[in-house]
Image (tube, rainbow, N blue to C red):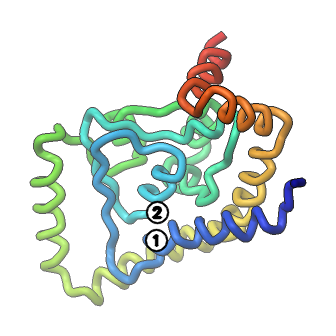
Amino acid sequence: MPWDPYEDYRWMKRSTDDYMSLWRSLKPTIAKVNGVCVAGGSDIALCCDLIFMAEEASIGYPPARVWGCPTTAMWVYRIGLENAKRMLLTGETIGAKEAARIGLISEALPANKLDDHVNAFVKKLITVPTNQLFFQKQLVNNAYEIMGLAATQRLSTLFDGMTRHTPEGVAFQKRCEEVGFKKAVLERDAANKQ
């Protein structure tokens, strides 16, 4: 069946809207990452207000190599031009310490301290009246929305469909069907190292 850009956009926009419900939540949202956080998982985490990661964890958007564009576009808004281009032009993943260093996440912690640290942080937040949390979150979110977040997301959602339907994207999807996703990714990554 031929690709229908309209249907693709509708489907991906629903996913983006679901991710962004974390951003639009009236209360602060916190992502706690203790493993690999890639593709849609990174979209979910980056839509939260704060992100805490175990030092051994990693984050990235590997589909940028051949089969996707992050529909939330939060990479740009969280880490700026240079680092967003670095992450999306390479599709690489980075460790939690590097993610904290470039301002992508709040903190990187030893895995055995992650839960206690996040719980202590949440206890700090609950001492602040809910209405104050709401107003502070809305102030920051509004600044990013004025910078064009919604328009950027519309474009990235369209581009996501396009990237999955380029000749290379279609070939990658076919290769996944032939040899399985893991092997196709290993082949893709080996080709990128040459």
Q: Which label is found at residue 47? A: 2
Q: In percent of the image, x 89 and y 54: which residue is there?
A: 2
Residue 30: percent from left, percent from top: 31, 63
Q: Check disc 1 and report the residue beneath it.
A: 23
Q: How many marks?
A: 2
Examine the rendering and report whether any part of residue 101 can be seen: no
Specify whether 143 is left or right of 29.
right
Q: Quadrant of residue 191?
A: top right
Is residue 129 shown above or below 69? below
Which structural element holds mark 2?
helix
- Dot 1 falls on a residue whose secondary structure is helix
List the single residue furthest toward the top.
194
Q: Quadrant of the C terminus?
A: top right
Outermost bottom residue: 131
Q: Are marks 1 and 2 in contact (CB under 8 Å)?
A: yes
Q: Label 2: how many residues lie within 10 Å, few (<14), some (14-19) or many (20+)?
A: many
- For the N terminus, give its image quadrant: bottom right
The amino acid type found where label 1 is placed reads: Trp
State the residue at coordinates (43%, 71%). 22
- Residue at 27% in and 33% down: 56
Q: Is residue 170 visible?
A: yes
Relative image position of residue 154 (x, y in whole percent): 72, 66
Q: Position of residue 27 (x, y in %)?
A: 33, 79
In the image, what residue occupies the spot 49% across and 40% down?
Answer: 60
Labels 1 and 2: the sequence-earlier one: 1
In this rendering, would 165 be left or right of 103? right
Residue 127, image quadrant = bottom left
Q: Nearer the viewer, residue 54 or 105?
A: 54
